[in-house]
Image (tube, rainbow, N blue to C red):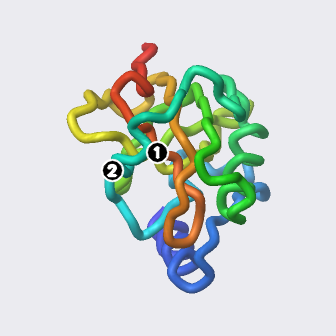
Amino acid sequence: MKKIALILAAALLTAGLAACGGGNSGNNSGNDTPAATSSSAAAAPEATADVDLSNPEIVVEFGDFDGIQALMKKMSNMEVKEGTVIKITGIYQKDTSTPAIMEANAEGTTKLGLSLYLPEGVETPANGTKVEAIGIATKGTYVMEFHVPSAEGFTILE
C-alpha cells in the first residue's frame, strides 16, 4: 500500500497526472487512494458560492465504477470545462489530507474516486459512508478538481 502511495505521489509531482488504475487485480484489497488530486488542499473558491447546482451536467450514480473512472480520466486530462456542475453519489473516504468521493468495483476489491474539496464547517462522516456531492469542476494546479461550494451540496445518505 505504501509503495502504491509513493508511486502515485511521484506521478503527481513529475507528470501532474493521476493514475487510471484500470489494471488492478482482484488481490488489491483496500486500494482507496483518490486518483485525481492536486497539490492544493484549499477549500472551494468563494467565486463558486453562487453557482446553480440544481442542474448538473455530469452525474455519477452510486456504484458506477466505470462512470467515476471515466470522469477521473477526463478531469486528470483537463477535459472537463471549468465551472461544469457535477453530481456524484458515492463513498466518503479520508485516508489522505484531502477527502475523496469513491466508487467500488463490482467485486468490492478496488475503489477509485476524486478528491473532494468541501467548504469549511461542513460535517463530514466516517469513512465508508454513502454521500451525495454536488459541486463544480475547478482548475487546479495539474488537474480539474471537484469543489463543493456550499454545505447544501454535500449530503450524508447513510
Q: Which image quadrant is residue 128 in? A: top left
The residue wearing badge 1 is: 147
- Which residue is painted at 59% across and 64% down in the image? 143
Say if 77 sits above or below 45 in the image.
below
On screen, residue 9 versus residue 121, left or right, reads: right
Say if 79 sits above or below 56 in the image.
below
Crowd rating for badge 2 (residues with CA inside 10 Å; few <14, some 14–19, many 20+): some
> Which numbered disc covers residue 9?
none
* Residue 29 in view: no
- Which residue is painted at 59% across and 58% down in the image? 144
On screen, residue 87 versus residue 154, left or right, reads: right
The residues bearing labels 2 and 1 have C-alpha atoms spaced at a distance of 8 Å
Crowd rating for badge 1 (residues with CA inside 10 Å; few <14, some 14–19, many 20+): many
Three-letter residue code for mark 2: Ala
Q: Secondary structure under badge 2?
A: loop
Residues under numbered marks 2 and 1 in contact, where contact means CB atoms less than 8 Å apart = yes
Quadrant into which the C terminus falls: top left
The residue wearing badge 2 is: 43
- Which residue is painted at 66% across and 56% down in the image? 75
